[in-house]
Every structure is written in structure tokens, then in C-alpha cells.
Image (cartoon, coloured by chain):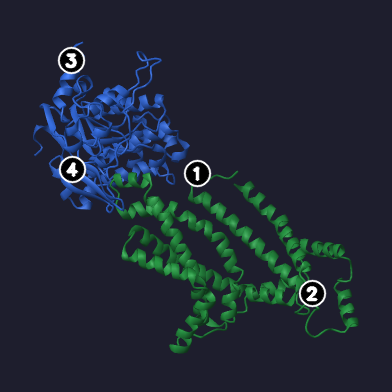
Amino acid sequence: MLSFIIRRLLIIIPMALLVVTLTWGLVRIAPGNFYSAEKKLPPAVEANIRKKYGLDKPWYTQYGMMMSNIVRGDFGDSLKYQGQSVNEIIRRHLPYSAVIGLLGYLLALAIGLTAGTVAALKQNSGFDYGSMSLAMLGLSVPNFVLGPILVLIFSFWLYLLPPGRWGGFSGIVLPVITLSAIYAAYIARLTRAGMLEVMRSDYIRTARAKGLDEKTVLLRHAIRGGLIPVLSFTGPALAALLAGTVVVEKVFAIPGLGNIFIQAVLNRDEPLILGVVAFLSILIMIFNLIVDIAYGFLDPRIRYE
Amino acid sequence: MTNDGTILSVDGLKTYFHTEDGVVKAVDGISFELKKGETLGIVGESGSGKSVSNLSIMRLIQEPPGEIVDGKIIFDGIDVRALSIDDVRKIRGRRIAMIFQDPMTSLNPFLKISKQLTEVTVLHLGHTKQQAREHAIKMLKLVGISDAEQRIDSYPHEFSGGMRQRVMIAMALSCDPELLIADEPTTALDVTIQAQILELIKDLKARMGTSVILITHDLGVVAGMTDKIIVMYAGKVFEQAPTRELFATPANPYTKGLLKSVPDPAHEQGKELYQIPGLPPDVAHLPPGCPFAPRCSRVEDICHSEFPPFVEINEDHHSLCHFANDVYAESKSEVAK
């Protein structure tokens, strides 16, 4: 088990460097660069800046320099935000994304697991059809539509919650709900499908034949197997959520990582792009590792060596 | 009601499934009686309603789509159909226990054997955890699992198929039930293991005095194990007789066909194995006459138009056939030769 975890942790480093390399290549291949703004810099100034950042050297030298810094955990300074290191920018903006991401996913889990389980137990009932229709709606309505609708209702009609900006609990309610909707819908459908499959299995029939009541059958015998699809979904979903969701952060003007990332791409801010991409890829790999470890606890048939 | 030692009596049981394809009459009016300590074999092809009848006795049919439409199920004087589901749960596992076909999937892969064994006695016998554990170890030893003290904390996947079926049997018998329903207990096992498991059931039955219903499609299995046999086809009882009599003088063409299909390596080497032509009917769309008519070797016109009567050959022997007496006489004359 320990050697499995160490091996998986070690492989993260080359994988992240590979992701960075590919991203760097894509940024370079794309037409234009940081200096191709509407307002052209005087050639002498641009040459000066390029020299300062080492951008006058051949591409392989630049790549080598960049990688040797990155390996040491240094992504350099942002081109746009002068004098601020990429690491510092990520550190500053991550908490906003992490808070709404984590709360959003917890809310989605609470709603999705409950609705999915009840829908499975009362298959083809009114609740089943109702919640699954709602889930379908949740999956179909994009969050750039849901967000403004919630703002319209709760901020402009009911005057209950602020329409945006960070600050206090009331400020995060709408973004968290907006964020969780699609995940709650997805988790509800996964849970329902998983539970339905498990409840039809032979070992559930055995449990019933023993005389156990439905609650015990569900909580002791069915829940583990039914949760496995949700667990697989949680790793990548949580990583993506923690790292920020562009649309929700834009709609509610939250200074999170997603917002910063989009700005970096639009600005062609190469160090910042690479820094965020590397951070994201490492996060996803770590969460996948956590999910794999959790499988082992949930399902005794899975053993790692 | 409990006179003459009858433990279970089923009368006119009908279990239907309401599907998009129409009403599937999985069990359509079967009746039988089981006395204390007796072993009943229920034989039939896949889909003949063997398992559904026994799941009905335990009220384990999923409703919907399934439904027990009609009939009486009297277990030890109790009308099982009239019980509330909570009262049925007090019988399940405690007084009637079941062993299922596939020990690979019938044990919960996520829980330790100890948990699965002890939860039954904690529930029904009020055992404490410690008592339940000791009892479980005793049961595992009883079904022939060596070093039960260590193995009790294993998960099902750490056992072989035969061992898992032993665990299933230990689980089923741990509350000392009055009736054990074994639903194809050996079908998923190797032949050598099959014999061991059957021996085990036979041995435990003798020791504990449990009545047994043995469901199987394998006539070889019921031959040495049962007191009487029910042959089912398309949800109906086709023939019902004491084991010895059924094998010697069957009064139904279907039973004769089944008996002829049993391979006899000693005498038939090199000969082609007999099989009943055709396939079991779709019970959602049965023809008006005898459901076996399209496959029957001695079919006549009446078989296609009229449903056959349940003919009494003698007090213990019944056959569902227009020509039951003729078939019986035929069998008798074959024996005489």
C-alpha cells in the first residue's frame, strides 16, 4: 500500500512536467504573443524587455531555462502583473476558488446522494420521476444561465442576497448553489443507477432472506457498492472545482483561480498560464490518487501492492 | 392446523409478473405439501417457475412488477400471505432459510464473513456480538471449514466457490430453521464439489431435522436426496410423486423426456444423447392447450386445443396430461420388462 502511494506520488512529477511542456508548446505555436497588444510598444523597449526575460534567446535555451526553474518549483514572475511571482498569485487566489468549490461539492453530495438513493428505493414513483427530471434540468441548464437567473430572483426581486463580490456568508450562497447544481444532478443520477444495480444483486436478496429490514439492507449491505460510481466521479470533479470554475467566478465577480487563469490566457501571460496548468494537473493527479486509495477502503477486493 | 406434521402447505399459488410484454404467469396455480423432516425436490427447466414459487413462499418477490395473485401459503399453521412484512421478516432467516444458486454473488463482497454470519443470530436469537461470533465459528466448523477462527474474518472473495457455498449453508442454518430452501445449491459448482455440498446438506438435515425444499434442474441431484418430487413446466406442476415412483413409473411425457435426457455413460456410450426437442415456451404468450404440446412426443389434437386435467394416478401421484393413465401404464409395462 505504502509503496503504491509513493510510486503514484513520484509519477506525478514527470507527468506534470510533460503537461507543462505540451502547454508551453501550444502557447508558442498559437499566433501572437504577450507583446502583440493593440498599443504597440516601441521596438527598442520591446527588445529591452525581451532581453530582460531571456526571450531573445533561441527557443530551446528558453525552454531549458524555464524547465530548470520549474523543477525547482519556481514559475518566475508574471509578465502582466509586474513584480509578482506566479506562485504568489496562485496562493492569493486559490482560497476563493477552494472555498466555493468545496462547499459547492459538499452541497452537491448532500443533495445528490439523498435524492439518488430515495429515487432508487422508490423506483418509478413520483419522487423518482420528479427528482430525475430535475436532475436532467440541472444537467441541461448551463451555469452561465442559472447564475444570472438566481441573481435576478434572489438579488433583484427578493433583495435577499448580494448579486456578487466576495464578502461574508451571504456573498457565497448564490455562487455555491450555482456551482453545485450540475454536480448535484450528476451525482443524483450516478447514485440512483448505482443503487438500482446493487439493490437488484443477489447478495441483497440474501440479506432480505435473512430477515433484515430494508433500512439495514440499505445501510449495511447496499450503500458501499452503490457509492463506488460516485467515488470515481469525485476525484476529477473535486480537483476541477477547487481549481476554480471560470464561469461562476465571472458571473459573481469572485477573484478566484479560474478568473486569473482566463485573464492569463487572454493576456498571453506565459509564466502564469504554465503555473496554473501545472498546479491544476498536480491537483487532479493527487485527487485521483486519493480516490484510488479510498476504493481500497470501500471495496475489500481491491488491494494495492 | 399443525396436525399430521405438515410444515408447509402451498395451495393454488399464482405469482404473476406485470411486464411491458404482458402478464408473465411465472407460477400458475401450484400446490404441494411438505411434512416435517421431509425433503421435496422441485425439478424443471430454466424459467419453469421453480425459483419464483419459493421466493413467493418467503414473500421475496419484488412488487412491482411481481405479484402473488392467488393461493394459500400456510407455514406451520401461519398464513404467510396475510402477515405484515415485519412479521414475515421474523420468519425469514429464523424459521425458513434459503441457500441460493451462485455463492459467488450471493454473499456480500464488501462485508467480512463474520459480519454476514453474526448479523442473523444477533437479529433473530438476540445474541451479543461475542455470542454471535462463537456461534458463527461453531457453524463454520459444522459445515467443514477448517481453522474457522481465522477464516471468519476473511472476505468472500478469499474463499473458493465450494467454500462460499459452505458459508452460505452455515449462514442459512445458524438459527436452526425448520425449513431450508436450497435453490440450485450446486449448479454453479464443480462436479466434485457438488457431491460434497449435497452430502453436507443431507448430513445436516439428518442431524438437525430440518425440512428441505431442493430446487434443481438436475434429476441426478434429487434422486438420492428427496422423498418426493414436483416436476414443473411453464409455471405449472406437471407431475408430482414420491421420488422412487416418479423415477420408476412416470405418468407424464415431459417427465419421461427429462428422465431420458439424463446421460447414462455406462450404457449409452457412443450413442447420441437424447434431448427434448424445442425450447420452453414464453410464459407471457401461452397457447390455449397444453403448454408442452409443441414439444411432446405423443401429442394428439386435443393437446393443442384443451388444457389437460390434473389426473390422480394414486393418492400421492398426480400428472397433468390428457393421457396420464396411458403414459403410466406404458411406464409400468416397461418396468415389467
Q: Are marks 2 and 1 on the same chain?
A: yes
Circle 3 or circle 4, nearest the eye: 3
Please identify the quarter of the rendering in which residue A66 is found: bottom right
User: Which one is nearer the viewer's eye here, A297 or B65?
Assistant: B65
| Secondary structure beneath label 2 | loop
Which residue position is annotated with label 2?
Answer: A33
The image shows a total of numbered marks equal to 4
Q: Position of residue B194 (x, y in %)?
A: 37, 27
Q: Position of residue B195 (x, y in %)?
A: 36, 24
Any part of residue A69 in sight: yes
Q: Return the disc, 2 or 1, that comes first in the chain's sequence.
A: 2
Asked whether the beta carbons under mark 4 and mark 1 sit within 8 Å of each other, the answer is no
Q: Are marks 4 and 1 on the same chain?
A: no
Which residue position is annotated with label 4?
Answer: B13
Q: Marks 2/1: CA distance? A: 52 Å
Q: Position of residue A170 (x, y in %)?
A: 49, 82
Asked whether the beta carbons under mark 3 and mark 4 sit within 8 Å of each other, the answer is no
Amino acid, disc 2: Asn
User: Which one is nearer the viewer's eye here, B53 or B89?
Assistant: B53
Asked whether the beta carbons under mark 2 and mark 1 sit within 8 Å of each other, the answer is no
- Is residue B36 rendered to the left or right of residue B164? left
Chain colored green: A
Asked whether the beta carbons under mark 3 and mark 1 sit within 8 Å of each other, the answer is no
Q: Report in which chain the residue with disc 2 lies.
A: A
* Above or below for B146 versus A69: above
